[in-house]
Amino acid sequence: MDKFDVVIIGSGPGGYVAAIRAGQLGLKTAIIEKDKELGGTCLNVGCIPSKALLTSSDHFSFAKKEAAKHGIVIENPRVDLPTMQKRKDRVVKTLTGGVRQLMKTNKVMVLEGMGTIAAPGKVSVKSSAGETQEIETKNI
């Protein structure tokens, strides 16, 4: 059974920042994430993708309504939704990759699966394949 100083369940903004800090302090740290990508809802499907799409929409609005006021002529601007979506996906991929690299740099073990507190000082991790492992920790 693996033993850690700190186990964090969930890799959202609070989780991954806590894991990085614990790793920086020299604590043997693990973070458990049920999804394939780190970063939680905000990074993968919430805040960041929304802001990426809003930025693209703002650029379109500028091209359509404001550019001419600046002497910039853009005839018939249009939205290419597949390209907009690809850009959003690249932004998300870049940021999730950055979080994963920070885990590696700070020696945080990433465990993929659903984490549950099994008992005081014990966390159970169930993988998507249905396999379960139990880990020990001083802090959850």
Image (cartoon, rainbow, N blue to C red):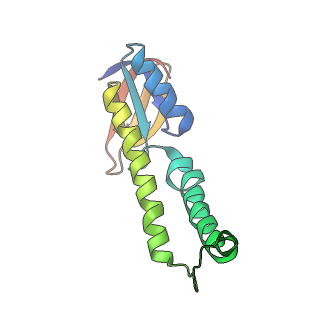
Residue sitting farthest toward the front:
71
Which residue is drawn at the image coordinates 45% and 37% (left, top)? 115
Q: Against 4, is 59 above or below? A: below
- Residue 117 visible in the picture: no
- For the point 56% across and 65% down, the residue is 56
Measured as percent of width and height from the top left, residue 38 is found at: 43, 44
**In the picture provided, is 137 more to the left or to the right than 59?**
left
Number of numbered markers:
0
Residue 58, by quadrant, is bottom right
- Foreground residue among 61 and 4: 61
Q: Image point 70% across, 75% down: which residue?
A: 65
Between residue 66 and residue 116, name the one nearer to us. 66
Horizontally, residue 91 falls left or right of residue 49, namely left
Please determine whether, in this image, residue 103 is positioned above or below residue 138: below
56 sits left or right of 129 in the view: right
Which quadrant holds the N terminus? top left
**Can residue 20 be seen here?**
yes
In the rendering, at what x and y percent does residue 18 appear?
A: 51, 26
x then y, percent, for residue 91: 45, 55
Q: What residue appears at the point 65 percent right and 69 percent down from the top-left corner?
A: 62
Write down the quadrant of residue 98 in the picture: top left
Which of 62/44 is in front?
Answer: 62
Q: Residue 131: x, y in percent?
A: 31, 44
Tell me the quarter of the picture where residue 97 sits: top left
- Is residue 111 or residue 83 the one in the foreground? 83
